[in-house]
Image (cartoon, helix red, strand yellow):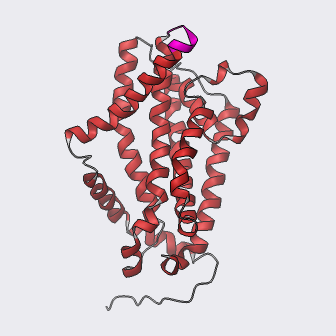
Amino acid sequence: MSAPLQIYEPFKAGLPPLRRYWRSLWSRRTFIAEFSRSELREQHFDSLFGQLWLILNPLLLSGVYYLLIIIIGGTSDSTRYVHLTSALFLFYLIANSLTGGVKSITAGQRLILNTAFPRIMLPLSAVVIAVFKFLPTLVVFLLIRVIVGLPFTWQMLWAIPVLGIAILLALGLAITISCVNVYFRDISSFLPYLTRTTLYLSPILYEASALKPNIRALEVFNPLFPILDSWSRAVVHGQTPPTGSLLQALAWAIGIFIIGTYFFLSREREFAVRL
């Protein structure tokens, strides 16, 4: 049989046939994996020093922040350093998804102009790359936890659904910002300031339990707050995260994913013109 004919229609805002779209995306899962691996090789992830830098960068950053905490607060606590490290590792998963996703469409200009495929593959690949970068840091965190001497509990398994929520949020953010960057290219220049501000407003340099109630009420406006708080409770303190925090984190992740995906799918047929 001959290959199916691809027809390019004039742009009209609206969703494509979703069943056919998701089926087409699933059939290209091997390409997504290979495309992500090629991007990782380009960033020297396959080399020893490339993987080492992925670990050293957040570790050095956590060391600097911890030193500042000791200087300003005047006290040192090994558990607080474990919290700082674990939260930074998860934060970098989301930040790397945003950094890779923001230019995923504009950087894939030639591919978009010459090949018919679901464009959402590009920000999805950026998140896959961020997850691959995150995995080595998990091993380092477990080593730090053993060295500090924190006990392992079954409640730590709550980290698995929390990580799943974090990846869903990262995917929604990457899809959204990749589409926004097609129309407003300056968003990529603004992104480093946004991620740094989010880092300071999230429970990374401090724990959520240390905040005053009137300040903690502002957490509802930060989608990373309940995720990082639940992550710290599970992997650092070995506790079950509050149900309210989990539901709030899940609501943020699902909401951003649905809104971002709808915006992306309804506009992606215009990308070739905008690029």
Image coords of residue 213 (percent x, y): 77, 23
Q: Quadrant of the N terminus?
A: bottom left
Is residue 56 found inside the magenta-colored segment of the image? no
Using the image, determine if residue 82 lies above or below residue 77. below
Is residue 69 shown left or right of residue 254?
left
Spot occupied by residue 160 in the image (x, y as percentages of width and height): 49, 36
Residue drawn at (45%, 13%), measured in percent from left and top?
151
Give 72 or 115, whichever is nearer the viewer. Answer: 72
Residue at image coords 63%, 53%: 256
Give the left or right position of residue 77, taking residue 51 as reference: right
Question: Is 177 in front, or is 164?
Answer: 177
Looking at the rendering, the stretch of residues picked out in magenta corresponds to: 70-76
Q: Is residue 233 above or below residue 137?
A: above
Question: What is the total number of numbered labels drawn onto the structure image?
Answer: 0
Name the residue nearer the viewer: 179 or 148: 179
Q: Residue furthest top?
A: 75
Question: Which residue is located at x 70 percent, y 33 percent?
Answer: 244
Q: Is residue 214 left or right of residue 95?
A: right
The residue positioned farthest toward the left in the image shown? 47
**Residue 153 visible in the shown view:** no
Residue 228 in view in this figure: yes
Q: Nearer the viewer, residue 123 or 194?
A: 194
How far across and how far down the image is residue 76, in percent? 50, 9
Is residue 74 in the magenta section? yes
> Vertical placement of 201 versus 164: above or below?
above
Whole-percent x and y of residue 60?
38, 27
Q: Quadrant of residue 28?
A: bottom left
